[in-house]
Image: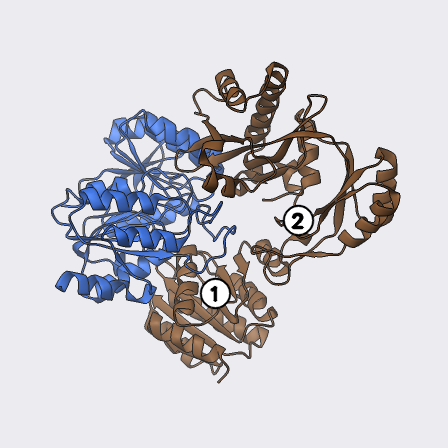
Amino acid sequence: MKIHEYQAKRLFKDFGIPVPEGSVAYTKEEALEIADKIGYPCVIKAQVHAGGRGKAGGVKLAKDRDEALRFAEEIIGMHIKNIQTGAQGKKVRKVLVEKGVNIVNELYLALIMDREKAMPVIIASLEGGMEIEKVAKRHPEHIFKEYIHPVTGLSNFHNIRLSFKLGLNKTQRGIFSKLVSNLYKLFNEKDASIVEINPLIITNTEELIALDAKVNFDDNALVKHSDIMELRDIYEEDPFEVEASKYDLNYIKLDGNIGCMVNGAGLAMATMDILKYYKGEPANFLDVGGGTSEERIKEAFKILIADKNVKVVFINIFGGIVRTDIVASGVVNAARSLNVNIPVVILLRGTNEEQARKIIDESGLNFISEVDFKKAALKSVELSRGD
Amino acid sequence: MSILVNKNSRVIVQGFTGKEGSFHASQMIEYGTNIVGGVTPGKGGHTHLNKPVFNTVEEAVKREEANVSIIFVPAIFAGDAILEAVSTGIELVICISEGIPIQDMVKVKHYLNTTNSRLIGPNCPGVITPDETKVGIMPAQIHKKGRIGIISRSGTLTYATVDQISNQGMGQSTSVGIGGDPIIGSDFVDILKLFVKDEETEAVVMIGEIGGSMEEKAAMYIKKHFNKPVIAFISGQTAPPGRRMGHAGAIITGGKGYAKEKMRVLKDNGVHIVENPAKIGLTLKKVLTR
């Protein structure tokens, strides 16, 4: 789960990690009120779950009152677009207004879970404010890592090693050590998957301040953290995805026109892949899970047909322990009760598949029943072209 | 021969009396798996499905000489369940549970490294050696005894693959679901190391997916040490970056974990890549009759 920068900075504050003075605003009036309080110059930052805010014009430095008002007005309501947000982009609903700070040096500091080594790793770099992937490509020697084995936890030597590699002076080293320890504490206690400060700045008064803050959490651990769960902002999520999550359906909206309903994540991805292989465009990823009860199929159908781009639905269920004839009845009942009138291509393989096909064929619905993965995919692509 | 499990495996079920545990235990018993008992704390001394229930894994292992444990406990307790099983020195632990917090798996993984136990999963369908034993949740009827080894990060996609292989008239030596989580007990290389020594396995089908780099690691191992044909399909070729595609481990992050890159590296190291998931069985047949 992702949270906003202002929420991450509140968490930082709770864990003793210094952040600039500031507060969140939902309107330009609120923004101005905060700016007046903290003084000028101030920074107005779009609060939205999308990277590349700076490039998109979502982060501005205001030197006076007039600029603060103008920038707040510009940023609230703008759309931030990038590869993750899709063509529509994400609407900015709030801004963080922060006091400007005096930057002498910019560092990069992050803690992430390294899946290959199965332990957290601290990543630090002298090139703060840059995309770390780009630094890693161009100057891998400018990136320093410390893996934290679960037996040792974070130990003093990790901090010392890093702070010398970063070339920090004695005062800075002391502050840095404390900051990394606090960051690790946050990471551990809140089951974070990423905690990133980019940039971590050194000021002219030798303070270290987190100028930006990104925290993601391990979804599997959220049940342990009701306080973190409250930070979820459903306005940042696709409305179809929010609806799907209520029914424990794994749904991801894409830009195509073939609605997919599949049991199992791997098969759902493979279904998208085969459609693309035959030059079709999947409208979504949807894993209805192992249970595939009538209720879940109905909810899945509702979400698929609510997407106006969807011209055809491709149902691909591999029934193993789940009997496909039961799945077939569920699909037919759900389609009837929802008056599904777009074509549906259905591939049911596994236990009792002959009975399942009979149920589909005799339903009188606009269903095309296939017995072969390739043929079913080709049929779906053909129907998606509308000719 | 086969790998990991066979007709001599003595299996216990952790979370035996729960809904999932009961259902799948009875399915396994029906298939002929030698389930020697189960574990549910507080229900020791009872019988369930005509098998003894124990309070602890330790007791079950001691009394029934179990050498394999399969876990069906809720995610939040599953990390502890694995640790408990491993602490008894049991040979093999297969964890079906999905949704274990990653920090729990960090502990599990490093503890495992200090023991001789092997973990398969979590978030996996288990392991089956057709006609001998099934220690998992896969539909048994699609499997056929044969000479193809399967290693997969997926569930239903594995079944679809097995189905394609069986339809081509070939069977499986052992099919292993290694799991869809970012941290798992055994990866492709660990299982390839077993298949390379298994005389009954003549070829291996790998089902990988986006996220992490275990397919790349497998490619390096195959080039150096694996002398049997390997066919691979990587799902998520069309998955957008930064999104978790159902499985916790299926996510492209920081420019890493793309299907395209995995396919390239595997191909460069001698693996037969299948781009179209409907053609896994067909490609396998072609490679073997060449």
Residue A380: % across, % down: 44, 75
Gap in angstroms between the C-alphas marked 2 and 1: 34 Å
The residue under label 2 is A53
Q: Residue at x 39, y 75 (%)?
A: A378
Q: Is residue B56 visible?
A: no
Residue B129: % across, % down: 21, 49
Where does the N terminus of chain A fall, quadrant-wise?
top right
Is mark 2 in CB contact (under 8 Å) with mark 1?
no
Horizontal side of residue A215 vs A328, given as left or right: right
The residue under label 1 is A261
Quick one: A188 or A289, which is closer to the camera?
A188
Q: Which chain is brown?
A: A
Q: Which chain is blue?
A: B
Horizontal side of residue A74 vs A15, given as left or right: right
Classify mark 1: helix, strand or loop: strand
Residue B71: % across, % down: 37, 39
Assess disc 1: are there few (<14), some (14-19) or many (≥20) residues with their C-alpha within 10 Å of its C-alpha: many
For the residue marked with disc 1, what is the amino acid?
Met
Assess disc 2: are there few (<14), some (14-19) or many (≥20) residues with their C-alpha within 10 Å of its C-alpha: some
Given the image, what chain letter belongs to the residue carrying mark 2? Answer: A
Whether A312 is drawn above or below B247: the answer is: below
Whether A15 is drawn above or below B20: the answer is: above
**Could you tell which of marks 2 and 1 lies nearer the N-terminus?**
2
Horizontal side of residue A252 vs A45, given as left or right: left
Quick one: B184 or B156, which is closer to the camera?
B184
For the residue marked with disc 2, what is the amino acid?
Arg
Residue B73: % across, % down: 43, 39
Quick one: B217 or B134, which is closer to the camera?
B217
Horizontal side of residue B278 vs A202, given as left or right: left
Of tags 2 and 1, which is closer to the observer?
Answer: 2
Classify mark 2: helix, strand or loop: loop
